[in-house]
Image (cartoon, grey):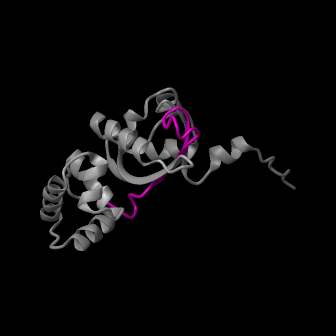
Amino acid sequence: MTPPIELDYRIAFDQAPIGLVLSRQRKIVDCNQQLLAMFGAEREQLIGQSFAVLYPTPDEFQRTGERIMASLDAQGRYADERVMKRLDGAMRGELFWCHVTGRSLDPSEPHAAGIWAFEDLSSRRKLRVEFTAREREIAALLIDGLTSKQIGKKLVISPRTVDVYRARLMRKVGAATTPELVNKLLSG
C-alpha cells in the first residue's frame, strides 16, 4: 500500500493546474511548475526577474502595469486577457493569448506585492495575424466588451484613435462588424 501524500501549501502551489506567481514590485519572487511549463522556462530564468521578460515588448509591459494600477477593484483584484511571450524551449519567442487574474495584497500600492494566476489560452485562441502591440492591447479590451470611449479612457487615447485601430483590426481579420471582429479574435 502506498503511503498517503502529505498535503501542504507548497505542494498545492507547485502542483496547481494553472500558472501561479508571487510578485514584489513586478518581479517574480516565486512561481509554480505550470507557469514554468507554459513559458518554457527554468526556475532560475524567472526567479528575481521582472515580468517584462514574459511580454512581447517593453512598451506592452509598461502599459499593462499602468492599466493594472488604474483598474484594480476595491479588494485589489484585476483580470484581463493579453498576449504574452514564451521564454525558451521548443516554442521560444512564440506569442500566445493568456488570461491573467490576480490580486495586489495592498490596493493602495498595486505593484508592492501580488498573487497572479496565468492560464494559457493558445489551444482556444491562435494568433494567426500579426498585430502591433497597440492592436493587441485594443483587441484584448474589445474582447472584454469595452466601447471605444472606455478603451480610450483606459489607454489615454481618443475614442477616434481607438476607432482607427478597430478598423485596422477588422481589415486584418476580414471582419465587417465589431461583433464579427470579436468573434474572430476569440476563435483565433
In this view of the protein, which residue sits in the foreground, 160 or 1?
Answer: 160
Q: Residue at x 16, y 64 (%)?
A: 170
Res. 98 in view: no
Q: Give coordinates of residue 3: x percent, y percent.
A: 85, 50
- Considering the image in quadrants, where does the C terminus appear? bottom left
Residue 121 falls within the magenta-colored stretch = yes
Question: Viewed as shown, does residue 117 lie left or right of 126?
Answer: right
Q: Residue at x 19, y 56 (%)?
A: 159
Q: Give coordinates of residue 22: x percent, y percent.
A: 57, 37
Question: Magenta region: which residues?
Answer: 103-126
Query: Where is residue 52, by image quadrant?
Result: top left
Res. 162 in view: yes
Above or below 166: residue 86: above
Question: Viewed as shown, does residue 103 lie left or right of 99?
Answer: right
Q: Give coordinates of residue 54: x percent, y percent.
A: 39, 38
Q: Give coordinates of residue 186: x percent, y percent.
A: 33, 66
Q: Residue at x 63, y 44 (%)?
A: 14
- Considering the image in quadrants, where does the N terminus appear? bottom right
